Image (spheres, rainbow, N blue to C red):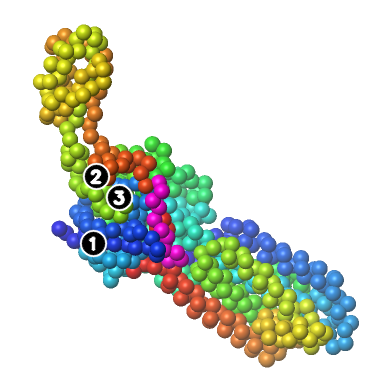
Amino acid sequence: MDASNGIEVEGLVREFKNGPRAVDGIDLQVRPGEIYGFLGPNGAGKSTTVHMLTTLLPPTAGIARVAGHDIVREGSLVRDAIGVALQEAALDLLLTGREHMRLQGGLHGLAAADIERLGAELLERVGLAEAADRRVGGYSGGMKRRLDLALALIHKPRILFLDEPTTGLDVQSRAALWDEVARLARDDGVTVFLTTQYLEEADALADRLGIIDRGRIVAEGTPAALKAQIGRPTVEATPADETQIEHLEAVLARFGEPLPAPRGAAAVRLTDGTEELADVIRGLDAEGIRVADLKLHAPSLNDVFLAKTGRSLEGAGEDELEEDTGEHAPEPVTA
Amino acid sequence: MAWRSVIRTARQPIVIVPPLVFPLFLLAINASGLDAATQIPGFPADSYLTFALAFPFMQGAIFATNTAGTNVAQDIGTGFFNRLSLTPMRGSSMLAGQLTGVLLVGTLQAVAFLAAGLAAGADIQSGPLGVAVLFALSLSIAAAFGTIGLLVGLRTGSGEAVQGLFPLMFILLFLSSAALPRDLIAQDWFRTVATINPVSYLIEGLRSLVITGWDAEALGLAFGIALAVFAVGLAASTAALRQRLVRT
């Protein structure tokens, strides 16, 4: 593994005062150029992990190396290598987008000419060129998120941490942000560590996923592999003519193991996966069976979460907020 | 950071206008209502307005406490502090930056108070050089009080806590020799409190330039106390900042 561009975590723990372990001994590896999705409900430990990996919060125990540098002993080297967009797009509402770029570039020690050039490029790339000279106080939530992303990129980081970057965004803004994150990894080779509570986001963006619950990683792998662990897809069909139910059951049985189905319908677990759906339809058509309803159910990441934790991801963790460390912890309360 | 502080200050009329208007308003009330005090034997000025001109400068410093503390508390509350923590920014740059806005407001105040005083007939006994020293002293006091605001803002991260300092500072101001010279304060307890209150010496330093001319002792004490408060406030703020910046 090219350590200069990856993340290695071993037994990472964070305990808060008088509270449970927000992060309870996680191990993970993120490969260079990979988009690693960190999926879990509110209060699972996602943001606390990001705060530790970005040097904002010292771990209670464990080791982590980001871009080849130890997060505890080499904090400044880690910060030089990473770009971070935290859960709240912390922006100064009185400054314009362009002024933010100047401030961020200046704090990273970039030359004024580079800041202007890079700032303009990044604002253009995230679709804020026209709004660049407007105060951020007038930006929408999506615009703030996109500016936050541009700010995280001004010093050309090798690794990008995005903490729930699309929470609260509308569908259009979310899709635009996904495109840009995917482009960063694909074209620029940036390694992305992305936390999310959205299943579709993890599915659409992540090369590999870690699913975290109550401070522990409960599953890890590619989205496809994780879903394959749960089982094969099922198909359920309802004939237009009720008298054809037995005939329909016989045809479906050619494609896999029959399953219990609602009255008037037949279901089967497909032996060879979703690719078989076209064959199922052709088979029914060849036998002259008219179908009133046909449903394909492929395992989702929610099914994976359900299988691993016994709970559904949606709505899980609402009452599991992590404890604040008091005066020192920088907003580790959610996620 | 200094540039940001100046922009933020310039774009918030609420940060600039009250510190200019409120002290002038109080000066006008005091000058008209307490003018009879000039008849007290031993009163050091013919005009109460001239005597009281130092008062708004001190009030301005109290506003500096508020401005500096509120800005830093706001940055902590919004998470902007985390953004700064993730850059190679040095803590000293951050503190200096926050104080720049305070000094900008302090300069505007000094110009406004002096202009109002001169327009109302006040005479600066120390002359043009004295005006420069008056500016230097008032900005030193503003910076010193600004560090107190920074300290409270950094320790608490709460704008409300910083606002809570405001009345306390005013009590210190009113329990000083702001309204009368210490030797003319009739109440023993008040005179004693005013004598141990460092604000008395700050205001007496400012006032000496207006009504006396060059008073080395008064100026030495005022600059000395301002610098001491600044040094202690800055050291404590730096420690609080180090604690707040929990980055590894």
Magenta residues (range): A318-330
Q: Which residue is mark 1?
A: A11
* Residue A304, image x, y percentages: 24, 41
Residue A308: which disc?
2
Amino acid at circle 3: Asp
- Report the front residue among A38 and B1: A38
Horizontally, is B116 left or right of A198 in the view? Answer: right
| Res. A68 visible in picture | yes
Disc 1: CA contacts within 10 A as few (<14), some (14-19) or many (>=20): some
Is mark 2 in CB contact (under 8 Å) with mark 3? yes
Q: Which residue is mark 3?
A: A213
Q: Say whether disc 3 or disc 1 marks the residue closer to the N-terminus.
A: 1
Residue at 64% over, 89% down: B220
| Cα distance in 3D space between marks 3 and 1 | 15 Å
Which of labels 1 and 2 is toward the front? Answer: 2
Give the dominant element type of the magenta stretch: helix, strand or loop: loop
Label 2 chain ID: A
| Cα distance in 3D space between marks 1 and 2 | 20 Å
For the residues beneath circles 3 and 1, the answer to whether they share a chain is yes
Residue at 26% over, 17% down: A263
For the residues beneath circles 2 and 3, the answer to whether they share a chain is yes
| Cα distance in 3D space between marks 2 and 3 | 9 Å
Q: Say whether disc 2 or disc 3 marks the residue closer to the N-terminus.
A: 3
Amino acid at circle 1: Gly
Q: Quadrant of residue A75?
A: bottom left
Horizontally, is A249 left or right of A107 in the view? Answer: left
